Image (spheres, rainbow, N blue to C red):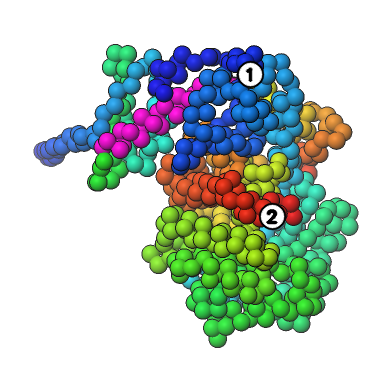
Amino acid sequence: VAASPAPVVSLIRMEPTPAAELRFDGAAYSLDALQRAAYRLAASAASEFRVEGSDLVCSLYPAGDEVDAAALAYEMRTLALDEVLRERIRTETAAVRNTILALAFSRTGLTDNETSPGGTLPAVPDPADERSDP
Amino acid sequence: VTAVELGGLASQSGLVDGVAYELMPMRFHRFAGGRVLLTNLVGEHLFVADHELMTILSGCAAGDLLRHLRGKHLVRLPGETLPLELLALKARTRQWRLAQFTSLHLFVVTLRCDHACRYCQVSRQNSTANAQHYDMSADTAEASLDLVFKSPASAIKIEFQGGEPLLNLERIEHIAISARRRNETAGKDLAFVVASNLALVDDDVIELAREHDLHFSTSIDGARTLHNRNRPRPGGDSWERAMAGIDRIRTELGGDRVSALMTTTDLTLASASDVIDAYVGAGLYDIFLRPISPYGFARRESSKARYDVERWLAFYEEGLDRIIALNNQGVPVRERYASIVLTKILTNDDPGYVDLMSPAGIGIGALVYNYDGGVFASDEGRMLAETGDQTFRLGEVGTDSYHDIIGSDALLSPLEESFAASAPMCSDCAFEPYCGADPVYHHATTGDFLGHKATSAFCQRNMGIFELILGRFTDDPVARRVFQSWVQR
């Protein structure tokens, strides 16, 4: 029995055109900051990044048909700058943040093998101690 | 200011007029008009001008600005430890409920109902349907109570749900008696609430409520016409029966024994003021302006009851302004969602409202015991199950232990995956201390527990509310006085 011929599949490659392309100086903007900005912009546009030399290039693909490319680019640049600020705050305050949270949640009785100090949150019984089924 | 200029800013501290300071954890959100909201680790807030944000981050704040920043623990002077200790204490206080799980236990004592509400979120059955199939049995009730009293919470509230729970009054009485008997040794602060349309309130209901100190929560959607259109029942007299039930409970049991909630539909959005005036006219001074939920059978109504976030926010703003105006005229009416949010903004307490908790309130804030013995992480999870989605079914009473249910992947996975402090966008959001994680909502609308925050209606709605409330609190002296009175109640 002769084998059936393989089906002919033709692929149509779709390459949408970005509404805007923005170039960021990699020394001033981290990829993380730009990706966070892109996430915030996601209701308006999807984003794609590529590295060109020391630059980060961001292509913006709008979510809808009616596109104001200039407004989209302006918003992305504004968001990106705010994300640089947030990154700066995170970096500078990471140690003290961890210190505060460690201070806040140490000796709460919420973890095993802790003694519950007087005047603090009540210790939670281990649910396993109350298992009632055989 | 460009990012290149930012790179040249002082790295750890500034030194102006001899005052050096160190940044403390903070988040910011830009408001219209050039203002920036700063919140610290526990949500205490300060508005600054746009240009002042750069001054602060470059270490150049001085004078009054620096004093305000220190007062809100947004910066500290080198070597100061008191701001750290105070923030730690406040952070710990805000999370005190974590050790007190689970305090709310919902018993779906029947799926039968005498109403056929247009937005009904459960697969309610006619009141004449076979009770054997749709009512909670005595064995299921006892097995559910076994789990309730395993909870470490010192305060336990049992809420009877439906369907219409008064159609299974026998089971309500059974559960109340058994719970009180168990509590003689458990010693918890035990309370009961019946979530009822009140159409079936009679002598037996009043007597049972008197004997077991039952409170009632009912539904009033607004004025008579709107309410009866939203909530059809035989005779078309839902509003009249609810009002009669409210009057009777107040007269015979006390004014504090009944409260009301509304559900918003597209019909409601025409006028928030009409809804508020209807509440005040009925002597109801607590109003909860709620959005329609996307769960369960309510989703089937999407073509009829759909409205977007912007329309709902406009409705909410109109309603809140009407309530503020009424307070200014001496009418002490309160909007409950704003009151919850304001408590989170202005104090270190957390009201424990399930939708605005992170970790999410499912399971650790509330558990639901369905008529058929299924245990659910939330009432919304139960509603999803009625449409065939069993994601939030944690186990079965009488089969699964408390440990199995509280430690189940069905509960822990959504709690972990939706935790706001580590979620994209939420972790940097200035409103995060006021907001919550809602894995059931995001699962229902997007298919995953976390959701996509940039497109989430939950996120857009809550951010809109936070902006509105903080804006009114800051700019309007009358609103500020009213808001403070709600928090101080």
Please say if B218 is above or below B430.
Answer: below
In which quadrant is the N terminus of chain B drawn? top left
Q: Chain of mark 1?
A: B
Taking the image as shown, residue B66 lies to the left or right of residue B55, namely right
Name, please, the residue furthest toward the right: B185
The percent coordinates of residue B278 (x first, y second) are 59, 73
Q: Which residue is mark 2?
A: B486
Q: Amino acid at mark 2?
A: Trp
Say which of marks 2 and 1 sits in front: 1
Q: Are marks 2 and 1 on the same chain?
A: yes
Q: Amino acid at mark 1?
A: Tyr
The percent coordinates of residue B37 (x first, y second) are 54, 37
Which sits in the foreground, B475 or A125?
B475
| Residue drawn where x is 82% and y is 35% of the image | A120
Classify residue B73 by image quadrant: top right
| Residue drawn where x is 70% and y is 43% of the image | B347
Q: Earlier in the sequence, mark 2 or mark 1?
A: 1
Determine if residue B406 is in view: no
Q: Assess whether residue A71 is covered by the magenta stretch.
A: yes
Q: Chain of mark 2?
A: B
Label drawn at residue B272 = none
